[in-house]
Amino acid sequence: MSRHRMLFVVMGLLFLLSFPTSLNAQESGVPPPVGLRPDAPPYALHGPYWVGTQDFLIGESSDDELQAHIWYPALNPDGLEEAIAYASVTKDASFPETLDATTYGHALLNAAVDMTNAPYPLVVFSHGFGTAAHTYAHLFEHYASYGFVVIAVEHHEMFNWEFTDLPKASIDRPRDITRTLDYAETLTADSSSMAGMIDMEQVAVAGHSYGGYTALAVAGARFDLTAFNARCAGVDPLVEWICTPLVPFEQEMATLAGYETMPQGLWESFADARVDAIIPMAGDSYLFDQAGLAEITIPVMAMGGTMDNGTPFDWGARPTYDYVSSAQKILVAIEYADHLIFGPQCQNIPWINDEALSTWYPFYCLNTVWDQDRALDLIRHLSTAFLLAELKGDVDAAAALAPDAASFPGIIYEAQGF
């Protein structure tokens, strides 16, 4: 057994032994350390904090406000069950107006903040294009249980099969993240019950799909539309739809970005210097290409499914890992997984069974290779370890990211700097 693997096993045993049994955990006021499956790896288990959640509005007026949701370490003096029904918004023009898009999760609504170990590092999450933030609440709840504050905003956009909102969203989304970071600074500095909660010196941005694009943009990736156009000129018809919503609207994008004429070469960066690490999950990286991605120097964990039909692996996670200049970077390739492998457990989104949404059901709920709970356990384990290592300096978590320690069936894992 290698030294890293032995350390990983010992760390896992110590992690498990640090908690009482489920019954005693409840009695002592500590959440029980359980994963989705009995074979969940250590950082897929519920962390040592109870999880609270609240909703906010960011903005001075209804014209520019962003709906925001926050998850955080919480107090639970009465030992309440973490159970919540999120009233998710729908951003798909084809969804019935009467659809009850409730998403079920595990958090305590409006619970008091546990300030014992505050301030906590911040994770800002950007949802997929045309989806809702609550789609990923299972991740936010998990990260908060490990001592992170998570803020997710609802980007202003609607999904249709022409992707008509995509050009504008490409410019607006990074700005939404910067506004969210500004808001977080105000939230932790004011005299509210959340004052002192957030460590603004330790910040990560994560996101799925076009949320992964958003994370790359605020990390410093720069548009290279010359390279993007060259790739689109010879594109396989099976993925031509990636190019058609954007190539004809480049001038519109440039105008929205503040240019009078179309920029030549790399565009100016959307980077926010407060961002210390990113986790793009099936993140669209094609607008940046090699030169634009090389502008990123902060730690990166790029995750994606090798059979992704939404953001193909070679248009997303693979080039992200290959081209970023980061000294610390990780590629997590989930073999044979499709685009929505990062989504919620299907029993927590009962609305997907609505007859009107029958065409969506296979995308959300039919994984031909993966047991959904196993995939989510691995996604939670690896991404949580990355956040702990990069934002909290956790040496055990960093050891869990060493290539021999992060070896799991069905995961192709590459790493530099770990």
Image: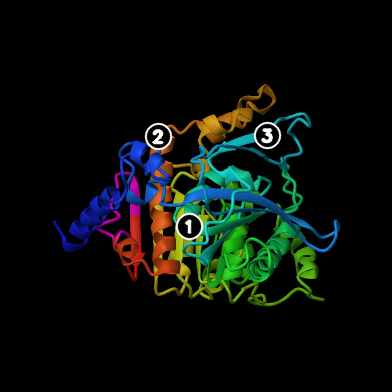
Q: Earlier in the sequence, mark 2 or mark 1?
A: 1
* Percent coordinates x, y for residue 394 in the rendering: 36, 66
- Label 2 residue SS: loop
Looking at the image, is mark 2 or mark 1 nearer the viewer?
A: 2
Question: 342 left or right of 162?
Answer: left
Residue beneath disc 2: 371
Q: Residue at x 55, y 33 (%)?
A: 348
Mark-to-mark CA distance, 3 and 2? 24 Å
Residue beneath disc 3: 101
Callout 2, which amino acid? Asp
Q: Residue at x 78, y 62 (%)?
A: 59
Please name the predominant secondary structure of the magenta segment in the image.
Answer: loop
Q: Residue at x 70, y 63 (%)?
A: 176
Range of residues picked out in magenta: 400-412
User: Can I make out residue 369 in this image?
Assistant: yes
Can you say whether 13 is above or below 401 in the image? above
Mark-to-mark CA distance, 3 and 1? 30 Å
Looking at the image, is mark 3 or mark 1 nearer the viewer?
A: 3
Residue beneath disc 1: 317
Does the magenta run of residues contain 196?
Answer: no
